[in-house]
Image (cartoon, grey):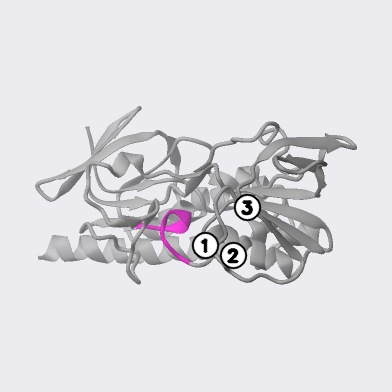
Amino acid sequence: MVELDALIIGAGPAGLAASIYLKRAGVSFALLDRGAPGGKLNNIHEIANMPGFLPLPGYQLALALSKSAEASGVEASYGEVLSVRKEDGFFLVHSDVEDYRVQAVLVATGFVYEPLLPGEKELRGRGISYCATCDGPLFRGKEVLVYGEGGRAEEEASYLSSICSKVYFLSKGESDGKAFPGNVERLFRAEILSLREEGGGILAAAKIDGKEKEIRVQAVFPLYGERSALAFLSGLSVKEEKGFLLVDETMATSIEGLYGAGDIVRKGLRQVVTALSDGAIAANALAAYLRRKKHG
């Protein structure tokens, strides 16, 4: 078993930012991720709203953040965390590679998207997107479709209505009475049956049940496959809401020594810049927590 001060679970923007701050604070820690450093950035077609960067593919921003962490002396390691429990003031973390005993844990696992639609996986970055504020401007003046329900889906549709010529808001549920601009067409108790591509594998249309014809759209934002990456915390009675960690202004959760950062925490805006901010705040608070424990 490896004994360290802390463990960062997730090497996306939040985890990478936190790792730089913890390294500078002299904290001994490991940075684990079950995928490539950069997280979901590696699957985003273009990032066009990152201050300090001209529009660039997501994987290039992921590489830049990873190299920044490496320059600080941080090395991300592969590992999928399977369980976390707390015993005698320490967190015991079990992964598929190594076990850890640490005083503090930072969860920065974000959300994962499970493709549920025929052709969804193949059309990622070619008309399929999971973030309207990230990719919406790429479809300015075009017709798009949001497939989901609840607050986040409504926010995505509302944002897109301000920049797209028409937005189809497709939901499996019933109407909730929420008002939308006139260029938003809401379709209830409906599902996407298939996606059609043309012109070099670019999304062209979606077939909807209850519709006689396909809906021609240039982008689909499917949110039903979104799921939390918090299963490994089932051994802790941490407070969460619909899969999002509830944290305070220091990114601390309801469990002492456990912090959250990035897309996995409940917040209004999920962007790279907010994830970086979360990581810095969480790392600063975590380091302060360790100092308090050391000096009593």
- Left or right of 121, for residue 231: left
Q: Amino acid at mark 1?
A: Gly
Q: Which mark is residue 188?
A: 3
Q: Nearer the viewer, residue 6 or 24?
A: 6
Between the residue at mark 1 and the residue at mark 3, the CA separation in whole angstroms equals 15 Å
- Left or right of 290, for residue 215: right
Between the residue at mark 2 and the residue at mark 3, the CA separation in whole angstroms equals 17 Å
Between the residue at mark 2 and the residue at mark 1, the CA separation in whole angstroms equals 6 Å
Q: Is residue 265 magenta?
A: yes
Residue 279 placement (x, y as % from top left): 43, 60
Q: Is residue 111 magenta?
A: no
**How many numbered marks, from 0 up?**
3
Q: Is residue 193 above or below residue 211?
A: above
Quadrant hosting residue 127: top right
Q: Residue at x 15, y 60 (%)?
A: 294
Mark 1 or mark 3: name the one nearer the start of the chain: 1
CB atoms of marks 2 and 1 within 8 Å: yes
Quadrant hosting residue 261: bottom left
Residue at which label 2 appears:
155
The residue range painted magenta reads 260-267
Q: Residue at x 15, y 61 (%)?
A: 293
Secondary structure at badge 2 equals helix
CB atoms of marks 2 and 3 within 8 Å: no
Residue at which label 1 appears:
151
Work out which residue is located at the far top of the displayed protein and give it.
96
State whether residue 52 appears in this view: no
Q: Residue at x 45, y 65 (%)?
A: 267
